[in-house]
Amino acid sequence: MKRLLAMPILFLFLLMLAACSGGQTSSSAEQMNEGKPAPDFKMADLEGETHELSEYAGQKVYIKFWASWCSICLSGMNELNELAGEEPDFEVLTIVSPDSNAEKSSDSFAKWFEGAENTSNIQVLLDEGGPAFDDYGVIGYPTSVYIGSDGVMVKSQTGHVSNEQIYETFENIK
């Protein structure tokens, strides 16, 4: 008799447990990579067009934070321009922070960049005052940020990274 009474209670318990875990399963299925969601941003490029990270939903994104005064950044411009021109299976964006972190003003940077060599494929976004710099926890230049197609910031790395290393890193990102 006790077994018959325990069965409905057990069934009810299992039903409640399944209902609770059902919500968790669906949210973890959306996130394919380990990490936290990348902070969204809204900033203009050098032509004045506005870009938001959310525009790239469903795509992998490589972001390089850099500065015009950074010698390591400048020595890697050739390679970065080459990467952006190859049309990899991820978006390539670069971010500079005018009037912040010793960077030129927007106008001065735009004039300087116009005369810079090997930059024809590079998409530069202007992080006015540096909020994205802070949101992404950038501690030095250059910094590479890898975002999965699920919008998760998978990796952030300070220092020069070769194109080969960038491709290798994205091989392990969904």
Image: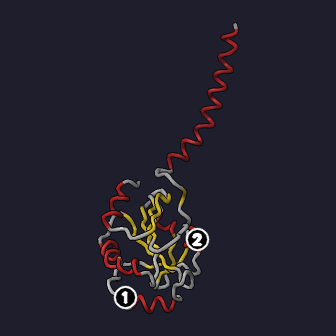
| First along the sequence among labels 2 and 1 | 1
The quarter in which the N terminus is drawn is top right
Residue furthest top in the image: 1
Residue name at image x 66 percent, y 10 percent = 3
Q: Nearer the viewer, residue 5 or 149?
A: 149
In this image, 169 relative to 100: left or right?
A: left
- Assess disc 2: are there few (<14), some (14-19) or many (≥20) residues with their C-alpha within 10 Å of its C-alpha: few
Q: Position of residue 50 (x, y in %)?
A: 51, 78
Report if the CB atoms under discs 2 and 1 are less than 8 Å apart: no
Q: Amino acid at mark 1?
A: Ala
Residue corresponding to mark 1: 116
**Picture mark count:** 2
Q: On residue 134, which mark appears? A: 2
Could you give the CA–CA distance between mark 2 and mark 1, rounded to whole angstroms?
A: 27 Å
- Asked if residue 160 is positioned above or below residue 74 in the image, the reply reads above
Q: Amino acid at mark 2?
A: Asp
The quarter in which the C terminus is drawn is bottom left
In this image, 19 relative to 105: left or right?
A: right
Q: On residue 88, which mark appears? A: none
As helix, strand or loop, the secondary structure at mark 2 comes to helix
Q: Nearer the viewer, residue 13 or 62?
A: 62
Q: Nearer the viewer, residue 94 or 16?
A: 94
As helix, strand or loop, the secondary structure at mark 1 comes to loop
In this image, 146 relative to 105: left or right?
A: left
- Visual colour scheme: secondary structure
Residue name at image x 32 percent, y 71 percent = 83
Image quadrant where residue 59 sits: bottom left
Q: Position of residue 45 (x, y in %)?
A: 48, 81
Residue name at image x 66 percent, y 26 percent = 13
Q: Position of residue 113 (x, y in %)?
A: 41, 88
Q: Position of residue 103 (x, y in %)?
A: 52, 84
